Every structure is written in C-alpha cells, then in structure tokens.
Image (cartoon, rainbow, N blue to C red):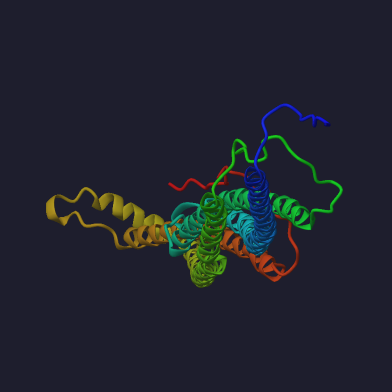
Amino acid sequence: MATLSSKPGLRYSVSDWATNNKQISHTAENKRNVSHDIRQEGRALRNETTSKTNWDEYDSSRRLSDRINDVTRWKENLKACAQQVDAEMDALTLSKEETERALAATLLPLEVTAECLNLREGRRGMELVCDPVEAELKKEVEVIDGAQRILQQCIDQAFEQLCRLQEARQQLTIDLQDKIEALDVDMSCLSLTIRSPEISLKPNPTRVPPGSTTPQQWEQFSRYNITRAKEEMQASVQIRENNNVQNDLQFNTAQRMTVEFALRKRTHHEEQAYHEMQWQLKTTQEEIAELEKDICHLEEDMQAKTAPLKLVHTRLENRIKRPGMDLCRDEVNSTTAIILHSLQSLKQHEAQMMEDLSRKQDALSLEQRSNQTRQRLTLGVQTEGLPSAVVPLTNSSGRHKLDLA
C-alpha cells in the first residue's frame, strides 16, 4: 500500500486564502484611490499655479503699463513746464536788455544837464541868479538819478529772478532726465517675456534698494518741481509788469521839455533885457554927445568972454569979503558946476551900463550854448530806434552823480 508525502508547515484553509486575496485586492484598490487623489490634487495644483502665474504675469504687465503711463504723463508735464520756463526766461532776458538800454540812454541826458549847469555857472554879476531854468535843470538831474536807481533796481531784480528760473529749470531738467531713464527701463521690462533670452534668476530680487521712494513721495517730488517753476514764472511776470520803462522815459521826456521851455523863456527875457540895455546905452551916448557939444559951446563962449569973465571973477572974489548973509554964491559958477556934475554922472552911468551890457551879452551867449548843448538830446531821441550797445549786467549800482548844492 502506497504512502503519500506532505509538505510540512502551516496550512490555510480555503476561506483564509479567499480572505487574504480579498484583502490584497482591497488594499491595492485603496492605494490606487489614494494615488488617484494625489494625482488629481497635483493636477489641480498645477492648474492653479499655472493660472496664478499667468494672472500674476498679466497683472504685473498691466501694472507696469500703468506705471509707464504715469511716468509718461509726468514726463510730458515736466517737458511742457520746462518749455514755459524757457519762454519766460527769454521774455525776462529781453525785458532786462530793454531796461539796460534805457539805463544807458540816461547817461547822455545827465551829461548834457550837468554841462548846462556848468555853463550857466559862468554868468557874472547880477546875471548870476537862481532862475527857474536852474531849478528845472537840478530837478532834471534828480529825475534822471531817480530813474537810474529804479532801472538799476529792476535790472538787479531781473538778474536774480533769472538765476532762480535757471535753478528751477535745472531741477526740471534733472527730474525729466530721470523720468526718461526710468521710462526706458520700464519699457525694456515690459518688452520681456518668458521666452526672452536675457531673463535669468537673480539673487534676492525682492530686496529694497537704498534711496528708494514711495509712489506718494515720487509724485510729490515732481509736483513740487512744477509748482516751484510756476511760482518763479509768476514772479518773473510780475517783475516784467512792474518794469515799465516807458513810464520812466515819458517822465524824463516831460521833464526835458519843461527844462527846454524854461530855457527858451529865460533866453527870450535876456534878449529883451539885452536889447533894452542897448537902446538905453545908445540914448545915453546921444545925450552925452549933446552935452559935450553944449560944453564945447560954453567953453567957446567963455574964451570969447575972457575979459568979462576976469571982471566977473574979480568982482566975485571981492564980493567974498561981504559979511554975514550978504555973502551969496555967483550964478555963473553955480551953473558951470551943475553942468560939470551932470556930465560926470552921465559918464559914470554909461560905464555901468556898458559893464551890465557886457554881462548880459555873456549870459545870453551861455544860454545859447546851453540850447545848442541840449540839441544833443533831440538827436538822441531821433536815434532811439537804432540798435545800441547793451550795458553789461552788473550787480553794482555805480552811476555818475551830480552833487547839487
């Protein structure tokens, strides 16, 4: 009878085997479910990160584009303001040059007025009077001196304002140049894409660089530069409006016409006095000639009557011895003494009139020279339209001054 061999060891029942297979299948299914869930979560995360990356990239580009628009807008504002500052600087420079020409134009009237005053100091005697001409000439010197001070003050103010405008313009230029460079950087960044060859990973790209500002500070800086430039332009316009050269020129012209009228009037009066003195001198000389003729006739009569005169002289000499109230003066001697005294008086008055006529002639000559000197002002007015040299701008106020007593 045959004997069956069996493998030693623990043997499982069919139910254990079936249970084991079922457990393995269940575990595998659970693992697959877990793996599926993980794969789904991974795919969802991939989709989410991809979407977020795309959105962040779009939002970054949009913000960068908005930033470029802001920088461009401020750049245009700065550029327009800089152009306005340039135009105002040109206008103020022209106004300053006009004022400098007006200041240079006051040198000739002042020189002419001083020369007229010096000429009139040459009058002699009673002709050296404080007449309205002298008063108007001194007033003209004061007017010209005051106009020179005002014009020099306007020039100094314009010079200082030009310096402030130049400083504001320089600040605008610096800000505008920074805006242009920043705009180039932002435009370059906006043109980059994920396929650009020059992109790479950078160490610590989110660091805050030193000297950086906030958007509020950035906008406030540009707004301050524009506001400051506009304030300086407004001050420049005010200076140009206050710098009314025409009023000063009209006032100087009015004073010059007043002086010329007073000078013509004084010259006319002196001419009348001169002609009157000539007539008086002529009449006096005629009277002297007539008196000399009478004296000659008297002398001839006296020579013809020498003998009777001797008799009369003897009688007069003897009659001097009359006592008391009977001592009377001789009629012949009295008449002769009166004639001689009248002749001497006329001679003395003639000498005085000759001297006064000489002084009046000198004074009239000086007035005529003053009129000829002031004709230079008329020639200067006629040549005002021609280009003249501009006085170099200086901060000093040195001018020729005429010291009046």
Residue lying furthest top: 8
Residue, far front: 1
Screen quadrant of the N terminus: top right
Where residue 224 sits: x, y (%)? Answer: 52, 54
On screen, 128 above or below 385?
above
Count how many numbered circles sit on residues in the image.
Answer: 0
Q: Which one is nearer the viewer's eye here, 286 or 46?
A: 46
The residue furthest right is: 197
| Residue 198 as seen in the image, left or right of residue 189 | right
Left or right relative to 292: residue 15: right
Residue pictured at 63% horizontal, 41% vertical: 206
- Residue 147 placed where, x, y %? 52, 58
Q: Which of 296 and 210 is in front in this view?
A: 210
Question: Is 250 or 139 nearer to us in this picture?
Answer: 250
Q: Give the image location of residue 86, x and y in percent.
A: 67, 60
Q: Whole-percent x and y of residue 305?
A: 45, 63
Answer with the quarter of the image where residue 271 lies.
bottom right
- Would you say residue 85 is visible in this rendering? no
